[in-house]
Amino acid sequence: MSADRTQHGMRTLRIAAGLLLATLPIAGAILAMAYAPPSHIEIAGQQVSVKPVLGQDTSRLLGGALVRPEHGHLGVLDKEVGVDVNADWNRLIPSDRRTRAYLVALWDDPTPQIARIQATARTHLVMWSAVGFTVGLVVSLATLLGAWQRRRRLTSYSPEHAELVRRHNKVLRRSLVTVGVAGLVAVDLAAVQAWQHEDHHGVVSSPVFAGTALEGTEVNGLAAEVLPFLSILRPRSSFYDTVADNLERSVGDVPSLRRTGDEVVLVLAEDFEDVNGMARQVGLAADLVDASFLALTGDLTFAGLPLETYIIDTVDYYSGSRPVYFTPGLHDTPAVLAAAEGRDWHVADGETTEIDGLTLLPLADPRISTVGSFGVGSILRDPAIDTERMVTDSIDEACAERPDLIVLHDNALGNRIAQAGCHQVAVLDGRSFEFVGPQTVTTSAGTEAIEFTGGSTGGHTSTRPDPGRITHPARFAILTVHPDDGDATYAVVTVSPDASVTTTPEIDLSVPYERYQASGFTGLPFGAVGARPGRP
């Protein structure tokens, strides 16, 4: 009877162990989601930790100093998931007034960063739940494989030897099974406890934030005393929201701009210098026309500080993460380049590349301005490469590869490269407050080539930090190139200080923008494609 009870007990333990092993992958997934270390992303030049929290119906910044109602919901499992976000408070809202000014645009339009936090939280949940499930599955399968292997080896012995081994290992076997069952029960109980965690919180919006980007946020602790006095918090402007609505209608009025067939459509812009709202419009335009890529010819930021690099995420978010070819300008420091490379932008390396059948030679300006640090003049990125060396090397590369487009920041250097006549379609450059457009350049061989110079997409008329609403017209271009024959057109998008937006019809690349303007914007002036009478 005693032997029967022992065998019955062992059989019960084995059944229990089998059932618990079946639940181990799910328990592992839950525990991994609940207790995994936070993920990290870079926002405005600083590391921000992102930790999804099961059962929480809010998102919290800095340990609950700021509480927002946004959270996720696992529909299949009917479970809410909030997010805890932590960063260095002093760097998030720095005490230095000038430094805070660079962050104004981020607070005015935090949507791209919120989207990055949400994407990071989703990736965190998927990755860690997969890790936990896989570990649990491996442990379960390894245990079952070990038990099967033991039974297979016992069957190779004679019945007498097999029985002798069983009796010899009985205490050890019972101990292992008991400990294993206890461990599996503990894991399941911990998983159940983690899953049952509920943290419901009704957000009480702080009235001090009415009309700002933090509207609808609850503020607690010291933050409630400090934040209202920071100059970074000001009534949120809807200016760029209005611009975006107008831009959708304006670009939509020129349907030929949308990419079709084998043509390559690119959006050309430069000199944002922290005007995040215009970075939004450029990204939006690229999405509207289904651009093949964006070509940004430098000066993304004013000071080149890491905290200004959120503008990179703005371009990505509104463009639908289209490829970006970035040719650094004088204000684009190594910190800006590192952030761009971290977002998988193609930073100019002086080598010819191909995009959808179009060949492109992107070039970095060899200088870095010290204006961001309030110095005077500029320094070289590489002490061995000055402007003369850069121009010479670029011409050598262009004449060897014969690219369709050459893209760089400075129009003075671009003009010299254009004079070599080694490009097929145009040299695209900038560093001009006024939008110039295409110009005919006489090459060293006596032929004609095209240089296309853009203007300040940030609406600047001087080198001065001005990250808010534009006070002068801001322009960028949409170019369409047919790689097979090199035919090309351009259209100019103009955003005015009153939030109105105009988009020209497609104009042949051989027609100067000045001539198009002088025509009065009517009919089919000077090779314009698709113009309509009366269309401004």
Image (cartoon, helix red, strand yellow):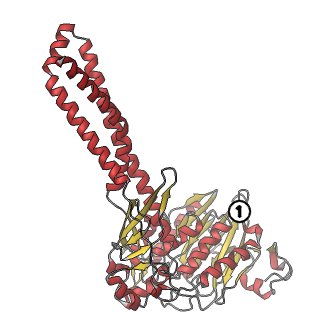
Residue ID for mark 1: 259
Residue at 76%, 86% in the rendered image? 517
In the depicted structure, whether residue 164 falls above or below residue 485: above
Q: Is residue 390 visible?
A: yes
Which x, y percent locates residue 328?
48, 74
Label 1 sits on a secondary structure element that is loop
- The image quadrant of residue 518 is bottom right
Which x, y percent locates residue 500?
69, 85
Residue at 31%, 37% in the rendered image? 139
Local crowd size for mark 1, using a 10 Å CA cut-off: few (<14), some (14–19), many (≥20)? some
Q: Which quarter of the rendered picture does the C terminus lie within?
A: bottom right
Q: Which quarter of the rendered picture does the N terminus lie within?
A: top left
In the depicted structure, whether residue 469 falls above or below residue 326: below
Of residues 401 and 16, the one drawn nearer to the viewer in this rendering: 16
Callout 1 amino acid = Arg
223 sits to left or right of 530: left
- The image quadrant of residue 408 is bottom right
Residue at 18%, 13% in the rendered image? 163
In the depicted structure, whether residue 340 falls above or below residue 157: below
- The image quadrant of residue 225 is bottom left
Which x, y percent locates residue 456?
58, 84
Residue at 64%, 65% in the rendered image? 291
Of residues 88 and 42, the one drawn nearer to the viewer in this rendering: 88
Q: Is residue 327 visible?
A: no
226 sits to left or right of 284: left
